[in-house]
Amino acid sequence: VQLVESGGGLVQAGGSLRLSCAASGTIFSIGGVGWYRQAPGKERELVAHISSSDNTNYVDSVKGRFTISRDNAENTVYLQMTGLKPEDTAVYYCNADVRERPGNWYQNYWGQGTQVTVSS
């Protein structure tokens, strides 16, 4: 199973980006998926999470600005980011629990990350 993030880039403060996390390989089902970010010199933090039943949670600093969603048919999870601030600058990673076959346990996977840079 591979997770591939895309959609990062350079944007001015106040702008928007939509990140995608596409899962590929042998996939029976995808459970919870989280978007994390890591800025230079800082620890990786969970930004948003969506469960298999579409329950969502966000870190306080992005509430009202970021929206996480999923397309189960496409094995893809999105992070819509609006009202971007310079402090949102980081490498964004997706993390997913994936069941490869019926009856298997979920295994946890990380993507390689995509850079988001917000200029002031």
Image: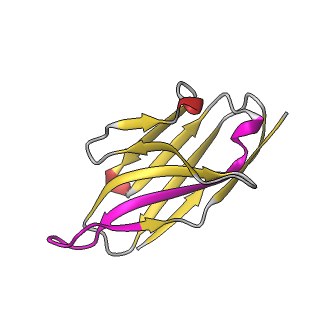
Q: Residue furthest right?
A: 120
42 inside magenta stretch: no
- Magenta-drawn stretch contains 91: yes
Foreground residue, 30 or 45? 45
Q: Position of residue 49 (x, y in %)?
A: 42, 44
- The percent coordinates of residue 16 (x first, y second) are 67, 35
Give the left or right position of residue 13, taking residue 49 as reference: right
Q: Residue at x 38, y 56 (%)?
A: 74
Q: Which residue is found at the position 32% from the left and 65% from the top?
A: 98
In the image, what residue occupies the spot 75% across and 55% down?
A: 40
What's the colour scheme?
secondary structure
Quadrant the N terminus occupies: bottom left
In the picture as drawn, the residue positioned furthest to the left comes out as 103
Which residue lies at the image location 63% right of the left edge and 31% below the top edge? 82
Is residue 14 found left or right of 31 in the rendered image? right
Q: What range is drawn magenta here?
A: 86-108
Tell me the quadrant of the picture where the C terminus can be found. top right
- Image: 52 above or below 64: below
Q: Above or below — where is 78 with respect to 14?
A: below
Q: In the image, residue 9 lies at what x, y percent?
A: 73, 50
Residue extending farthest top: 64
* 77, 73: nearer the viewer: 77
Residue 88, image x and y in percent? 69, 40
Numbered marks: total: 0
